[in-house]
Image (cartoon, helix red, strand yellow):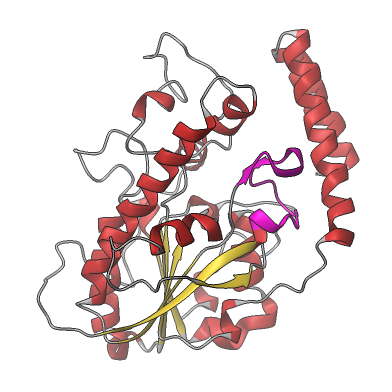
Amino acid sequence: MTFAEWIQETRRKFRNDPFPIAARGAAQDFWVGALSRGLHVVHSGETEPIWNREFDVCLVIDACRWDLMAEVCATDEYDYLPETPGEMRSVGSMSPEWISNTFGLDYEEQARRVAYITGNTFSGNESDSWPQLPLDESRLGFLDEAWRTHWEADEDVEVSTVPPEVLTDKAIDVWRRRDELGVDHLVVHYMQPHTPFRSRPEWFEARGGDQAETATDKDLWKRCRDGELPKDKVWDAYRDNLCWVLDSIDLLLDNCDGTVAITSDHGNGFGEWGVWGHPPGNPLEELRRVPWVTVEGRDHYSYEPTVRGRDRDETGSDTEADIEAQLDALGYR
């Protein structure tokens, strides 16, 4: 956030919020902005694009800290995971930054050969901060923005998101059709373990609606910062969302040939240096250090997807209202 943007946001806060809340929010934003600049000196490690690593299929699980993955790896819940995950330093601390830096002009050759299936709304969100967005389909080998057609696709899920099962179905279908589509790599951008958390729908129902008596415009991270939500309970729900996507990845690995990498676009701050969530342009270790795990997948054709990848002439809803509502559900508005 630039100083001019901070001034504009501060004015908005004081117009809409009670003075103590607006003052605290403005001070926090100023601190995080100043901290981001200072941390570039403390955490100056080079970032690394996924294209530097070897993979056929890359599964990007959104907002997964390295230590969260390490906690799950240390158990025997998933036999395809190692005892300790590898790691890399992400090119972004927020999804639009990662998407722009991964599919930017420096990687046009890779982009032309890749199929990108995403549940992340930022791929279609225009922003002055990230000139590569919205993604231009003509620059990619194949683009399937599942959030346009499969938002809240599972009636059994009480939170607003793209369930991982949709992305897994599309990934299996598209990878089996890779020769037909003319691609030799696949990147799948799952929304989990990013908020909202499936195990705690009551924490999110107030956003974008009025069904909760405790309606609030504060996102989960601000409520956790202010002590309104217990930090340990938030971590447990965060971990459960990771298990949600890992369960679905288990199915993919039995129906997908090749080297499959599992990584993340960024992590989340849990109060380290006063940072909560994942502000853009921040070099904090907890935001940039993400897992990198590779597994050899094998297509046993044990599963036939019920959701196909889009056909090239298929379009979905792309109104501004859709994008705004989805970003609100993810905690960005």
Q: Is residue 72 left or right of residue 127?
A: left
* Residue at 47 percent of width and 62 percent of height: 70
The N terminus lies in quadrant: top right
Whether residue 142 is visible:
no
295 up-or-down from 95: above or below: below
Does residue 314 appear to the left or right of 321 in the view shown? left
Q: Residue at x 23, y 74 (%)?
A: 173
Q: Is residue 46 above or below residue 120?
A: below
| Position in image of residue 140 (x %, y %) | 50, 77
Percent x, y of residue 83: 41, 71
Query: Closest to the observer: 285 or 258?
Result: 285
Per the rendered image, the range of residues in magenta is 269-287
Residue sitting nearer the eye, 201 or 121: 201
Residue 31 left/right relative to 79:
right
Magenta-drawn stretch contains 286: yes
Q: Is residue 277 visible?
A: yes
Q: Is residue 333 magenta?
A: no
How many numbered marks appear? 0
Quadrant where the C terminus sits is top right
Q: x%, y% of residue 93?
A: 66, 56
